[in-house]
Image (cartoon, rainbow, N blue to C red):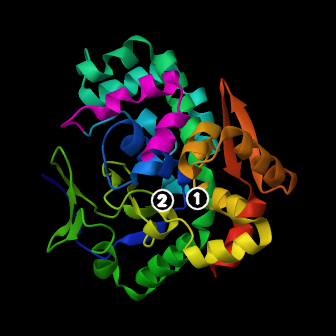
Amino acid sequence: MWSELRVSSTPQLQISISPNLTALAMIADALAGRRRGLPEPWRKAIAAQVGPLGQDAVRPLAVPGSSIAPDSIVPRSPVDGDVSVRSQISALHDTSPDALIEDLEQAFGPGTPPPHWRSAAERPAHWLRGYASALTDVWTATQPVWERARPLLDREIERVGVAAVRGGHELLLGTLSDRIVYGERGLLISDLESSTFELGDRKLVLVPMLAGKDAVIVSLDGPDAVWIAYPVPGADSLWRKPAAPAVDELSALLGPVRAHLLCALDQPMTMSMLALDLRIAPSGLTYHCDRLSAGRLIQRERRGREVWIARTHRAEELLELFCR
């Protein structure tokens, strides 16, 4: 099915770099089961990062055949500018339980909400805490690769700016995603529940995401603006590990085991996950991690019974140098 956004004149295009929607796309793909092209290793790493409270909160987003959700899942929209994940989490903590109930009534009508949202309606404060927890955990896993996406985002800002100035919106909007088609009357957006909207004189805000190739998140009913979040072009290059020549050159500097270890950390991993991936004994892995930690190339964080390993910004710069 398709939702339609009718565009009768040249739209007012705007771009927002709001990573909070990247985090939402990751939640939908890795936790809520709405697979949209996120590579399986990333799905597993993100799912492993989120605790029980967050896992429970995202379940309503996983119901087949339903795409409607209360506005509280995006308490700060990208309409008025860029929205960070931290500000989104703060907004969730500041959202009152009564506001969530009002959002559910606005989304589904007065009375009892659909079964998959009833737990949130019955314990709104608990749901808000859980969803904020999920967003926090997902961003912990995603932030390093988001930082590496900056050149792609800069190019997309330029592409949208050129289209806005030169009037090439048809070509731009038709290339956002395979799930978005620009037709005679405007945009057709693949959706689980079809509806029709008029853009009118509202702004059209584009939000590039770091997400699977089929991820699309939209808000078409805002009073002043419509926003569409879509995968930033070239995002698939960020999921891939550095090519072998880069590893070989890095091996001369760090040694082969530490070079492969560093390259394996495309996303934070536990010590047990790393040991399995590299096929190395835990004692040997600890030794090499100690050396990389001393060089400020990795950081370790204990969460419960697991120790999580992540590359530092210094390591990202080093890998970028060897991947040129």
Of 27 and 176, nearer the camera is: 27
Return the x and y of residue 72 as percentages of the image width and height: 44, 33
Q: Is residue 52 magenta?
A: yes
Q: Helix, strand, or loop for circle 2?
A: loop
Distance in Å between CA atoms under marks 2 and 1: 7 Å
Residue sticking out furthest to the bottom: 166
Of 3 and 41, nearer the camera is: 41
Return the x and y of residue 71 as percentages of the image width and height: 40, 36
Type of amino acid under label 2: Leu
**Which region shows up in magenta?**
43-66
Q: Crowding near pointer 1: few (<14 within 10 Å), some, many (20+)?
A: many
Question: For residue 3, which quarter of the picture?
Answer: bottom left
The numbered disc on residue 192 is: none
Residue 113 visible at all: no
Instruction: Please name the residue shown 50% across and 42% down the image.
Output: 46
Left or right: 68 with respect to 262? Answer: left
Mark 1 = which residue?
Answer: 146
Whether label 2 touches label 1, CB < 8 Å? yes
Determine whether 83 is above or below 99 in the image. below
Type of amino acid under label 1: Trp
The numbered disc on residue 210 is: 2
Return the x and y of residue 300 as percentages of the image width and height: 75, 41
